[in-house]
Image (cartoon, helix red, strand yellow):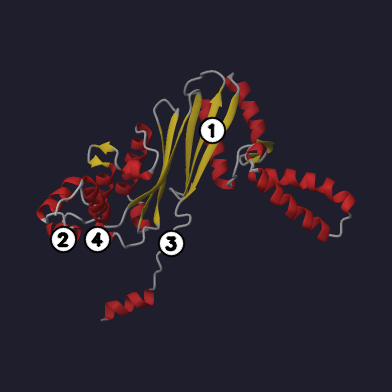
Amino acid sequence: MAFTAKDVAKLREQTGAGMMDCKKALTHTDGDMDKAAEYLREQGVNIAAKKASRIASEGVVYCGVSADGQTGAMVEINCESDFVAASATFVELCKKVADLVISSKAATVEELLAVKCDEGTVLDLVNNATAKIGEKISVRRFVKLASKCGMVEGYIHLGGKIGVLVEVATDKSIGNNAELRTVCHDVAMHIAAFAPKYVYDEEVPAAETEHEKEILTAQAMNEGKPASVVEKMIGGRIKKFYKEICLIDQDFAKDSTKTIRQLMEETSKKVGSNVKIVRFERFLMGEGLEKKNENFAEEIAKLQK
């Protein structure tokens, strides 16, 4: 039975084994996928695949920034236990992957896993870590921000439970300005704490604003307010709604006497260049992932058998 490069890639995806190991297995089994998988097991090279059915719901969000401060990457890599997530080996893996995101042009996780590195590819790097650590490890997501004139800064909270990457632009080059970097770090920390959805009011989709107006109108009517004053009330309440979900007019976490907008204006004067927040990304580790269900009674019962 003949096999193609797609068959090799499919076997690699199924087993987590290296490309050459998969090609060798398919050659040995004359292209039979099932027998090739068995052959890999016999050879002991698909260690990562043996852990494929486990739930990797712990992990780390990690941020890395290039030496010039203009490109940043944030990755979420998952494992099975918080003990492993806190280990130096796992954190070093996260750093390597973030560095490879910065240096590569990968736009998807699949493209990232195929990026070349010292260990072969990022997939090989992850599989080697799986074999060494003994838990299922998976690269879940990543984001890359790059500024042509400005900087990118990251912030990690609670040892990798929350990560933020923020990009700011300046109207002239001021290099890797230390004062601006400190402000960007503080803004990223604010985003981690308050979890805004947008930077500016105008970024809020019209449908979301209209939906909120409908809710606020119903609330006002239920409060017994006359229709003639409801419209005026809605204007004020929409402004409050924008402040809750948009970064720029929120009270600054480290100094509630000023807003983020005022902080940016103040910073612009200090660094001698107009500073504008372009965008941000916020990752909450494990958001939406299925959690491992620990039943300690069952575990004790198994040990007593």
The first of marks 2 and 3 along the sequence is 2
Q: Within the image, what quadrant is residue 172 found in?
A: top right
Per the image, the residue denoted by label 2 is: 35
Residue at 88% over, 49% down: 229
Coordinates of residue 10 in the picture (x, y in percent) = 26, 51
Q: Amino acid at mark 3?
A: Glu
Quarter placement of the N terminus: bottom left
Per the image, the residue denoted by label 3 is: 290
Coordinates of residue 69 in the picture (x, y in percent) = 44, 28
Q: Contact (CB < 8 A) between labels 2 and 1? A: no
> What's the mark number on residue 184?
1
- Note whether 6 is above or below 261 in the view shown: below
Q: Within the image, what quadrant is residue 293 found in?
A: bottom left
Residue 162 visible to an observer of this rendering: yes
- Note whether 289 is above or below 128 in the view shown: below
The first of marks 4 and 3 along the sequence is 4
Per the image, the residue denoted by label 4 is: 50
At label 2, counting other C-alpha atoms closer than 10 Å, the crowd grade (few under 14, some 14-19, many 20 or more) is some
The first of marks 2 and 1 along the sequence is 2
Per the image, label 1 sits on a secondary structure element best described as helix
- Note whether 230 is above or below 271 in the view shown: below
Per the image, label 3 sits on a secondary structure element best described as loop
Q: Amino acid at mark 4?
A: Lys
Alpha carbon distance from label 2 to label 4: 16 Å
